Image: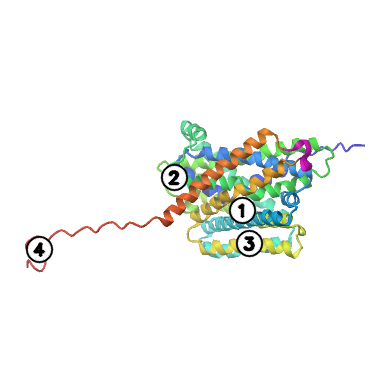
Amino acid sequence: MANKKRRWPIGPGLLVAAAFIGPGTVTAASKAGASFGYALIWAVLFSVVATIVLQEMAVRLGLIAQQGLGEAIRGQFPGAFSRFIACGLVVFAIGFGNSAYQTGNLTGAAQGLDLLTGWGAIWWIWLLGFVAFAVLWLGGHGWLERGLIVLVLAMSCVFVAAAALSRPDLVALARGSVVPYVPPGGLATVLALFGTTIVPYNLFLHASAVQKHWRDEPDRELALRQARLDTLLAVSIGGMITVAIIASAAAVFVEPREISGAADMAAQLRPALGSRLAPVLFSLGLFAAGLSSAITAPLAAAYAVTGVLGWSREPSDLKFRAIWLIVLLTGVGFAVSVGKSPVATIIAAQVANAIILPLVAVFLLVIANQSSLLGTHRNRWLSNLLGTAIVTIVVVFAGWKLVGTFRSLFSPVVTPPAVPEAPSAPGDGANGA
């Protein structure tokens, strides 16, 4: 007799949304609103659509093929050389990308605690790194994650309320939503919004998570419909929160300004909470978002890399632990070394992920077109068209940024000519005494 149990269609999509509602999103969206008003909302909407499209491919891979993305990549490149190249590229992308994320996660969490206590962010980075290590090593951190998610959701709800209470310019908001304009100096922020929303490791994490969530559902078609709805709802809610952060920053900071730290970003919550409570809730929310992501990112990297390399995916395996430990230590090291520029550090981490995103997306597109894995659920022309467009757009913006960076590095420094001093007037100075 068929199992008639029907699971509520809310599941791993929340992991996807929670992964990008972290310090990177809060910082990038706050900077976008404070520096450029509503002009970059289109970048968030593009990123939300791109995330839904790519995560839906990962969902099909997990539910229909019953494989993670790392396992599928390994299986699609049987030759020794081609497998070495493919696996090497994925390991580099995930290892580098998650290390960059980890830097931003720890920096953001430390900024939240520093705003609350005033003890200094560097010490908090070391302590948070130790806490993340202990949780990952011991396991059983579900209760901690649930508590952190509650704080993140509370901060997110207040951002939405603050955006509504601050009376945003609806005409400018609508224009910024549909006109893809990059203001002078805004390219890095556009890439940061891409990189903090379309999270590469989520493609690996989601494909594995849907297998576990719907493992007791014998009707694969029903599970697929529920997983698609789950992804659509969760990612859309996450995008709405990101837009709310931009709108609240644009309304509060009427004149364009640079965001220098957590205290500046906390000012966006004043319309909803007042000047006393705003920094407290923002600090707790930023800390929770950073620590939860600081636990998730190394773990996701370990699952992705072990899947690609064909190693054991048991959390107690030494190789598995070695991977997340490398990501964690790299993040701590970079966060400590550049801790004096927290906003710049977090933005740079998201830009780095946007630059490596196309590599992972291309592998996903190749896998999603394999009839041997997905049968009739392989990509159709619309999925391929959207996926190709997403990769192309991100590559164009990333290339634009890289060209500008190299041009600034290698362009000659022009020293302005010295301005001759004006001749001394008669009677002026020692000679005229």
Question: Do we see residue 364 in this rendering?
Answer: yes
User: Separation of disc 3 and disc 2 at Cα?
Assistant: 32 Å
Question: Of the residues shown, which amino acid type is indicated by label 1?
Answer: Ala
Question: Of the residues shown, which amino acid type is indicated by label 4?
Answer: Asp
- At 37% from the left and 57% from the top, the residue drawn is 412
In the rendered image, which residue does mark 3 sit on?
328
Foreground disc of the pair 2, 1: 2
Q: Is residue 99 left or right of residue 272?
A: right
Question: Do we see residue 21 in this rendering?
Answer: no
Label 1 sits on a secondary structure element that is helix
Q: Is residue 136 above or below residue 217?
A: below
In the rendered image, which residue does mark 1 sit on?
288
Residue nearer the viewer, 398 or 154: 398
- Mark 1 nearby-residue class (10 Å; few <14, some 14–19, many ≥20): many
- What is the x, y in percent for residue 124? 56, 62
In the rendered image, which residue does mark 2 sit on?
35
- What is the x, y in percent for residue 241? 58, 41
Question: Of the residues shown, which amino acid type is indicated by label 2?
Answer: Ser
Q: Quadrant of the N terminus?
A: top right
User: Separation of disc 3 and disc 1 at Cα?
Assistant: 17 Å
* Residue 373 highlighted magenta (yes or no): yes
Q: Which region is colored magenta?
A: 371-378
- Mark 4 nearby-residue class (10 Å; few <14, some 14–19, many ≥20): few
Disc number at residue 431?
Answer: none
- Mark 2 nearby-residue class (10 Å; few <14, some 14–19, many ≥20): many
Q: Main secondary structure of the magenta part?
A: helix
User: Separation of disc 1 and disc 4 at Cα?
Assistant: 66 Å
Quarter of the image where one finds residue 391 = top right
